[in-house]
Amino acid sequence: MAFTLDIGQVAPDFRLPATDGNTYSIGDFSDPFLVVFFTCNHCPYVIGSDEVTRLTAEKFAAKGVRFVGINSNSPNTYPEDDFPHMVERMQAHQFPWLYLHDATQETAMAYGALRTPHFYVFDRERKLVYTGRGVDSPRDVTKMTVNDLDRALEELTSGQPVSVPKTNPIGCNVKWDGKDKHWMPADACDLV
């Protein structure tokens, strides 16, 4: 089996605390479509593209798309990725998504998260229809030429098949606890 969740696979469940004080699992989201994305507080690729992600989330909210961000980074690698900083970040930016904390990194491993940000789009049956990057230049969106996430959601919410179901996520690798900050699991690899 590939490291990263493959197209057609069902969203792995989780039970994670969020910055809003609640705990969530997959079953808590009744929205027709679900975007789960791995993100964090410090990564320049996340920070550079957060506002584009916000616009995409706001654009598709009325079409039944729910966004859920998950921070799996070890605060032992980057202290600013700890839960209190997550709460501060959400208070400061008021992003239109839930922000969950994967302290054990089990959810990142179940999904096969490669980088921050890394997006996973699920259909009504919670089967994966898109995985990869949000945009082609997340660190500097002024150079962006493609918004893959927007295209995938446009096709999905219009009842069309997703024309490009996989792209390679662009960003910092997930910061695995007890490992060098550049370490990735041996079976982690590009998606295309």
Image (cartoon, helix red, strand yellow):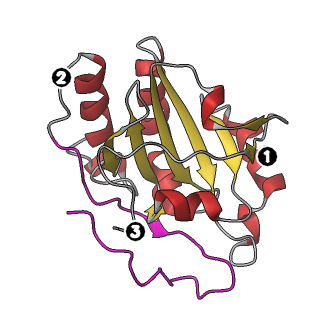
Q: Is residue 174 above or below residue 10?
A: below
Q: Main secondary structure of the magenta part?
A: loop
CB contact under 8 Å: marks 2 and 3 = no
Q: CA distance from mark 1 to mark 3?
A: 32 Å
Which residue occupies the foreground of this view, 159 or 13?
A: 13
Which residue occupies the foreground of this view, 12 or 115?
A: 12
Q: Return the residue at label 3.
A: 3
What label does residue 88 carry, if any? 1
Q: Is residue 80 visible?
A: yes
Q: Is residue 166 shown left or right of residue 163?
A: right
Amino acid bearing label 1 = Glu
Earlier residue among tags 2 and 1: 1
Which of pointers 1 and 3 indicates the residue nearer the eye?
3
Which of pointers 2 and 1 indicates the residue nearer the eye?
2
- At label 1, counting other C-alpha atoms closer than 10 Å, the crowd grade (few under 14, some 14-19, many 20 or more) is few
What label does residue 160 carry, if any? 2
